[in-house]
Image (tube, helix red, strand yellow):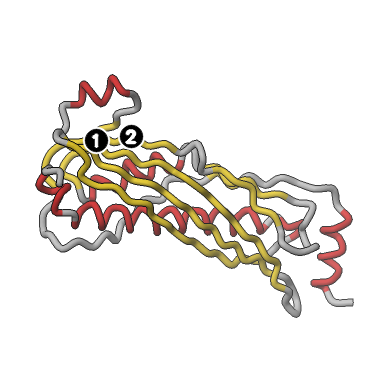
Amino acid sequence: MGIAAILAGISLALPGCTYTANTTAAPARNVITSFSNKVPGKWAVLVEADRLNTTARSEDLNCSAHTFPINFTQGFPASVRETFPNVFAQVEDAEAAEGVRNAKARGVIQVRGENLQSRLKIVPGFWSNNVVVDVDMTVAVTVEGANGRLFGKTFDGRGRADRPLGMFCAGGAEAVKAAAEDAQRDVLRRIAEELANSERVRSGRAG
């Protein structure tokens, strides 16, 4: 019997474990725009990440007893705060309606996490197994200016990671975390580029 098969049998025999993948700040750095300057003015930013939580599970028998929760509650807002200064001249957190009124900003950017999905597969190898994780994230973005809506769109981001499975499926947590942060960077890059290239956001004039 091969080593991979032995490890798979051990993982099935063990009681289930939970490996939480708490994502850290993973901002988008490589933002490409059509302008040499940042979007002018100060902008208030509201971030909602409550829906960006899910649990990755193996799609086959290997590691089926193990779960890998993904939590973006802290990592996603921090990533937004680190990404937007790359394209906006000034940003300010506005975590409540009162904060928005007091911000005296050109507009309010609302970033709301809508959905998070994950897929985890075990790929058998000759000497060992690997775990491949795909994470898909959906985020809705609106920008309100002084005279109305300046921008509104839903964005999708995707991340993938391939890691050694390790003993007792522990490598799954590393793969889940890497894929989740990759998806986060992908969606934030798309958001930042579109906001930075939006003529209406730059001018502050609603259509």
- Decide: marks 1, 2 in contact (CB < 8 A)? yes
Could you tell me how far apart the alpha carbons at marks 1 and 2 are, in whole angstroms? Answer: 7 Å
Disc 2 secondary structure class:
strand
- Which quadrant holds residue 93? top left
Q: Could you say where residue 134 lies in the image, as x and y percent from the top left?
A: 56, 62
Image height of 62 relative to 140, above or below: below
- Describe the element under mark 1 as helix, strand or loop: strand
**Residue in the image at 45% along x and 52% along y:** 138
Residue 177 image point, x, y percent: 55, 53
Q: Nearer the viewer, residue 80 or 155?
A: 155
Q: Nearer the viewer, residue 62 or 100?
A: 100
**What residue appears at the point 75 percent right and 51 percent down from the top-left corner?**
66
Residue name at image x 31 percent, y 56 percent: 29
Label 1 amino acid?
A: Val
Q: Which mark, residue 88?
A: none
- The residue identified by callout 1 is 108
Horizontal relation, residue 79 to residue 151: left or right: right
Give the residue type that dot 2 points to: Leu
Residue 1 image position (x, y, % from top left): 90, 77
**Disc 2 marks which residue?**
46
Q: What x and y, as percent, mark residue 77?
A: 40, 39
What is the number of callouts on the image? 2
Q: Residues within 10 Å of mark 2 (few under 14, many from 20)?
A: many
Judge whether 138 appears above or below 96 on screen.
below
For image coordinates 60% across by 62% down, the residue present is: 133
- Residue 107 versus residue 172: which sits nearer the camera? 107
Q: Quadrant of residue 129?
A: bottom right
